[in-house]
Image: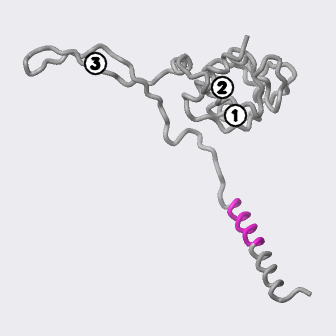
Amino acid sequence: MIGSGMIKFFSAILVAGITLTLISFIGNKAIIAQELEKDAVPIEVIAKVKTEPKQVKTTNNEEVAIETAEEAPASLEELIASADLKKGAKLSKKCAACHSFNEGGKHKIGPNLWNIVGSKAATKDGFKYSKALISFDGEWNHASLNEFILKPKKFISGTKMGYAGMKKIEDRAALIAWMQTQSE
């Protein structure tokens, strides 16, 4: 026979479980998550660019050249050209859950990405693309890959790609540079 202490114990667990389920249900209904249209705080990459030395007179009236540096945003092309390919290979492991990168590789959840840089979008034979990607009449160049990897669903609304995006431009540049090596 079960004692009254055991009945009280199981009743308490049952009530706690029901309470947590109700709180979770009400919380999910009360809070409506919306994706931001643009970043609240835009992030800009700054690179140091050397300029001509500045001539300055000292207290002895001698002219001395002083090196100066102006800050200018690095372009995507500059970042790709100077990207660390090992870092790009490491970052590609996130993509490898859904994509393969080898020549003749099989499609996974996403298409094989061998030779993707410079190719027309949604053209890999044997892969069933979403309507959104089929209607995207573009090429996977550096700029389009950068925007897609940043926020896939924002760049191509309706894409089935579930990846949230890669925020750091340096990371995207490294990944794109590495993807460029995965070609003929």
Q: Would you call the spot at circle 3 few (<14 residues within 10 Å), some (14-19), or many (20 or more)?
A: few
What's the amino acid at mark 1?
Answer: Lys
Task: Please give the label number shown on residue 67.
Answer: 3
Q: Quadrant of residue 9?
A: bottom right
The answer for how far apart the CA atoms under marks 2 and 3 are is 37 Å
The type of residue carrying mark 2 is Ala
- The stretch of residues the image draws in magenta is 17-29
The residue that appears at 89% across and 86% down in the rendered structure is: 2
> Dot 2: what SS?
helix
Say above or below: 4 vs 110. Answer: below
Please say if 146 is above or below 184: below
Question: In 3D space, how far apart are the residues under numbered discs 2 and 1 (Cα atoms)?
Answer: 10 Å
Q: Which mark is residue 14?
A: none
Horizontally, residue 166 falls left or right of residue 125, namely left
Mark 1 and mark 3 lie on one chain; the one further toward the N terminus is 3
Residue 139 appears in view? no
User: Picture quarter containing residue 163?
Assistant: top right
Question: In the image, residue 19 lies at what x, y percent?
Answer: 73, 72
In the rendering, which numbered label is found on residue 94?
1
Query: First in sequence: mark 2 or mark 1?
Result: 2
Question: Considering the numbered disc 3 on the image, is that residue within a helix, a strand or a loop?
Answer: loop
Residue bearing mark 2: 89
- Residue at horizontal 64%, vertical 21%? 178
Q: Residue type at mark 3: give it.
A: Glu
Residue 18: image location, x then y, percent: 77, 72
Q: Quadrant of the C terminus?
A: top right
Q: Position of residue 161 (x, y in %)?
A: 74, 34
Q: Nearer the viewer, residue 101 or 125?
A: 101
